[in-house]
Image: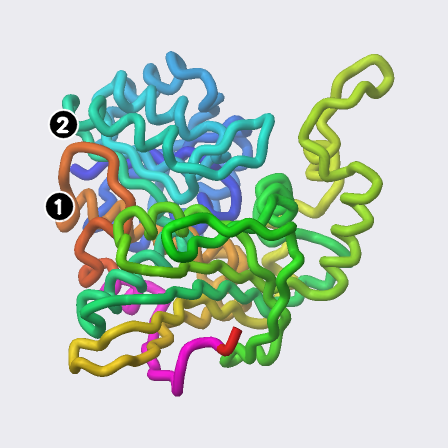
Amino acid sequence: MSKILVIGAGGVGSVAVHKMAMNADIFSHISLASRTKSKCDAIAASVKERTGVDIDTFGLDADDVPATRTLLNQIKPSLVVNLALPYQDLNIMDACLAAGVHYMDTANYEPLDVAKFEYHWQWAYQDRYKEAGLTALLGSGFDPGVTSVFTTYLKKHYFDRIDTLDILDCNGGDHGQAFATNFNPEINIREVTAVARHWENGDWVETPAMSVKQSFDFEAVGPKNMYLMYHEEIESLKTHLPEIKRIRFWMTFGDAYIMHLNVLQAVGMTRIDPVLYEGKEIIPLQFLKAVLPEPASLGPTTKGKTNIGCIATGLGKDGKEKTLYIYNICDHEDAYAETGNQAVSYTTGVPAMIGAAMLLTGKWSGAGVWNIEQFDPDPFMDMLNAHGLPWQVKELDGPLGF
């Protein structure tokens, strides 16, 4: 039996569990845990209605390592899929080590008190996981995740050498809200307001947050403004594919989003340091998260499509310089019809299911801590096509002109 424990009952956790239930030949027993058990129960009810599969639900504070270890010893899963907050990654990795269970996540660890997105905290677990004979798979979402697999797929089949890589993340959906984020508001706003960094010629290049803007015409979405940002797959890709001279990450934002964000930042609502309010310390960004719409609630009203992919330039296997664009288009309404969640959750939850399937079926294996681009991309890419995230490759006339 392939028992699995998913930790986290947000939109991504919901999608992942629904898709796991649709693949009962791989996921024979599914458990779902979260700090708020009622969220798990609601997902379990939807899974039962849509697939007929029963899943177990548990209340769990994943910051409590002994409690997580106790639950793991009770369930005895083969794998933990961590879809909780990135602040909890290290605690869950510790619990998996203590209980002898394989580990997987979709986003790298970041400390609560500073928006610092780096892998070194998790890479430091390499020796402990290797000695324990356990696998830790990092970053099996879309970005990081699919975009990293896209890159290694291009390298394996089309390029002898990749020189430049641009990752383009476009959400062309409209949820009808004045201001809302399509995934956890706290994580989203921490990312957007952080200093932008990209990798170029062996060093980091920093620019002020949201200061570099370009327009790109996305298939099925249309022209959108996209902004240069830092994202964690830049660090892992430049480490594991050191030949790439420049790696950049771009994300689209509408003018209304930028306007609201600028106001919130100007008045201090995006701060992550504590302030004293009525004798109690509160974190302004956490308070803002509490009053913004819950991302999982946006599914019924979100229309439009996402378009996420990579543009790579380099020396092709035919000996010629070329530029290739590999991407996926996902429809918000189709995602909601299948799983009850909008496409931003869907595009992360499906790769989480696929990464788990890679480990459970033995297509990917190895003791230690691994980033997703270190494994063979082909079986993962096949499952993307089969499970709702079809991709395509097209040749461009040349690299991006900026």
Q: What SS does tag 2 mark?
A: loop
Q: 306 or 76: which is nearer to us?
A: 306
Q: Is residue 298 left or right of residue 162?
A: right
Q: Is residue 79 visible?
A: yes
Q: Position of residue 115 (x, y in %)?
A: 57, 36
The image quadrant of residue 73 is top left
Q: Position of residue 152 (x, y in %)?
A: 25, 61
Q: Is residue 189 left or right of residue 48?
A: right
Q: 380 or 76: which is nearer to us?
A: 380
Within 10 angstroms of label 1, few (less than 14), some, or many (20 or more) residues?
A: few
Asked whether residue 242 is drawn in magenta, I would say no
Q: What SS does tag 1 mark?
A: loop
Query: Which labelled disc corresponds to residue 362?
Result: 1
Segment colored magenta: 381-400
Q: Position of residue 272 (x, y in %)?
A: 67, 31
Q: Earlier in the sequence, mark 1 or mark 2?
A: 2
